[in-house]
Image: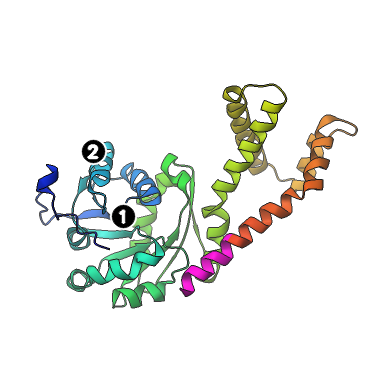
Amino acid sequence: MSLNIGINMDKMGIHLPIIRAINYRFGFIGVGNMGGALAKAASRSTKQILLCDNDVEKAVALGRQIGCEFADSHSVVAECEYVFLGVKPQMMADMLGEIKKTLEKNPDVILVSMAAGLSIETIRKMAGGDYKIIRIMPNLPVEVGEGEILYTTSENVTKPELGKFLNLMKHAGQLTAMPENLMDAGCALSGCGPAFVFKFIRGLAQGASEAGIDMEIALPLAIQTVIGAAAMLESNTDRIDKMIDNVCSPGGSTIEGVKSLDASGVEKAISDAVVASYNRNVELGQS
């Protein structure tokens, strides 16, 4: 897998900028769904960002959208303080192998890994050195500033370096320290969880549609219902069971719906989804 996007650039009518010896804050190698979302979040704090991707047009378009530059992978490693490794776990070894010589020339670079299942030690072995690593587990809502980013670091990342990183990423949403041995479990919850929530919201809207409301109306109603319920839960000190009871009047309509959810085993199904995602994270780390 090559992420040196200088190849065949002229044929596409795209030209790399001349990268001078200036201090770029962030570099992104890979701007797919998650890498692109993080780049958008980071751009709300700084425009000193370089973007790189196999899909050159995607990187260029994103750069124009958020006001940042694009470059090849070696320029990203050579010029940036923090380099996000936005490739799939299965591609990480090849990508790090390609930039290994450039990494050796910039040993103080801080590598930011978002690869599920790959530990800090594994990333270091792939990179060929005891580089500074910030391992993160983000979720897609970082794109709209409402994300969750779990993070842990290698022992040689200093407090000022971590502090700068957290400050620059503050517009992504909430950042939560997590011991590395719990990162795979945390990713299964907050990283994978948005997909589970999307399915729940779609189920709410489909139910309303079956009851006669057009989907164009039902979906916004379902979204706002979930937003309001989450906000209320966040600001309330009552246990979740108490919150559920507060909505359910004896003999009313809500309790009938809750009985149906219980009969279908909805909570167990959601719990099983998190465990399945966790198990896959563990598998990715062993492959």
Name the residue type under label 2. Arg
Left or right of 113, for residue 65: left
Q: Is residue 1 above or below residue 40?
A: below
Q: Residue 219 placed where, x, y %?
A: 59, 29
Magenta stretch: includes residue 116: no
Q: For marks 1 and 2, give the CA distance.
A: 16 Å
Q: Is residue 11 above or below residue 220?
A: below
Q: Residue at coordinates 40% horizontally, 50% vertically from top-left? A: 34
Could one spot residue 18 in this view of the protein?
yes
Left or right of 14, for residue 82: right
Label 1: element kind: loop
Q: Which residue is mark 1?
A: 30
Name the residue type under label 1. Gly
Q: Which residues are magenta?
A: 277-287
Label 2: element kind: helix
Mark whose residue sits in front, 1 or 2: 1
Q: Which residue is mark 2?
A: 64
Q: Quadrant of residue 245?
A: top right
